Image (cartoon, rainbow, N blue to C red):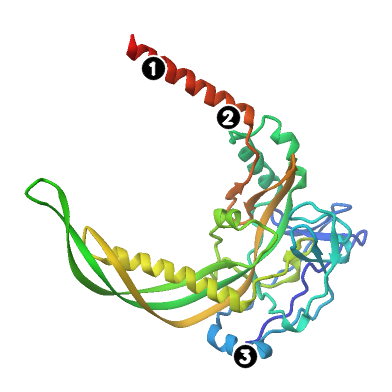
Amino acid sequence: MQLSEVSAGQKLACPACGGEAQWNPAKRALVCAYCGTESPYELKADGEIVEHDLVAALQSIPQTARGWRDERRSVRCQHCQAISVFSSAQQGKACDFCGSTALVPFEDEADEIIRPESLLPFDIDQPRARDRVRQWYGSRFWAPNNLGSKALTDTLHGVYLPYWTFDADVSARYTAQGGEYYQDRDGKRQVRWFPVSGQVRHFFDDTLVCASRGVHPRLIQAVEPFPTTSERLKPYDPGYLSGWTVERYQLDLVGAAQRGRERMMAAIRRMCAQDIRADTHRNLQVSAQFERQTFKHVLLPVWLVGYRYGSRDYQVLVNGATGQVAGEYPKSWVKITIAVLLALVVLAAIIWLDQG
C-alpha cells in the first residue's frame, strides 16, 4: 500500500504580505486571511483514488502504516479530547469543536499514522454555511428566543474530519421461520409458521465510518452521507487544507473495520428479512461471506459551531459538501410550560363540554 505524502494544515504563504493563505471554495483560489489577496493555485488534477486491500493491510499494519512525515503541530483539547492538526499560525486559539482554550501539545506516534491520500473539498463556503445555521436556529420552535444571539454564528469553523470508507462484496445465506396470518373459527388472527431460506448478495460501496472524537456521533450521522464517489473525491493536495483545521483520527483501522463490518451486517440482515416471502418472520439466522474488501482513509468537510448555553455545551454541524444541517439546542422551559398549560386548558374545556 503506497500512501501519498501529506502535510496536515500546511501553511501556504500570501505572496503579497507573507500571511497565511486559505483555500476559498467559492473562489476556487487561495485568499490571504490578512490582506485579502487572491493567489492562483493549480490543484492536482492527476492522481488516482486507490481502494486498498483491507485484509492485506490488517495483516501487515506495522509495514503499511506510515507517519505524516511533514512538519505539523498537533494539540489535544483537554475538554473534548479532540486532536487537531494545523499550522503554527493557527496555534493558541480555542478548540474548534467545543470552544475550550484548554489545549495542550500532543506528540503523534508518527510511525503508526496512516495518512489520508484523498479528500472531499468544501463546496459550501462560509457565508452559505452561516445562512443555513441561522435558518436552522430560526426553525427551532422550542428553543429560547435569544438562542440566535447567544449561539453566535461567528464561531463557525471549517474542519476536515477523518473518515474511513469500506467496500465489500457480501453474499449471505439465511434461514428463518416465515409466518402467514389467518383467522380461526372464532375470528381471531393466528399465525401459521413454516421454514424459509434464501440467499442475498450485495456490494457495499463506501460504507462510512467517522474516526472523529471532536464531533458528537449522532450529529455527524445526521449530516451524512458525503458524496465520496471517485468523481467527487480529490487526490490530496496541500492547497485544499491551507488554513483549515484537520482532526487526526482516533479510531484506528482495526476498530473502524470492525465497525464497518457491523454496519454492513446490520444492512444485510435487513435485506434478508425483506427477501422473505411471508407476512411476518422469526428466528432469522444469517451467515455472510465478505469478499473484495477494500478501504480508504479520507478527509471530509464540515462547518462547525460549538457554543455554551447555561451550563451545557452544544454543537451545530453543516455538511461542507451538501449543506445538510444538524444540531443540538437548549429547550425553553417557558415555552414548554405554556404549551402544557394550554393543553390542560383545552382538555378541561373538552371534558366540561362533554359533561354539559
Residue drawn at point x = 78 percent, y = 74 percent = 7
The kind of residue tagged 1 is Ile
Q: In what quadrant of the picture does the C terminus appear?
A: top left
Q: Nearer the viewer, mark 1 or mark 3?
A: 1
Pick whichever of labels 1 and 2 is earlier in the sequence: 2
Pick whichever of labels 1 and 3 is earlier in the sequence: 3
Q: Nearer the viewer, mark 3 or mark 2?
A: 2
Pick whichever of labels 3 and 2 is earlier in the sequence: 3
- Residue that lies at the very extreme toward the right in this rendered image: 17
Q: Position of residue 225 (x, y in %)?
A: 53, 59
Could you say which quadrant of the image residue 290 lies in? bottom left
* In-front residue for pair 182/145: 182
The kind of residue tagged 2 is Ile
Q: Are marks 1 and 2 in contact (CB under 8 Å)?
A: no
Residue labelled with disc 1: 350
The disc placed on residue 60 is 3
Residue 89 appears in view: yes
Could you say which quadrant of the image residue 9 lies in? bottom right
Tell me the CA gap for discs 1 and 3: 71 Å
Picture layout, residue 142 above or below residue 31: above
Q: Position of residue 159 (x, y in %)?
A: 71, 59
The kind of residue tagged 3 is Ser
Residue labelled with disc 2: 336
Neighbourhood count class around disc 1 (C-alpha, 10 Å): few under 14, some 14–19, many 20 upward: few
Q: In what quadrant of the picture does the N terminus appear?
A: bottom right
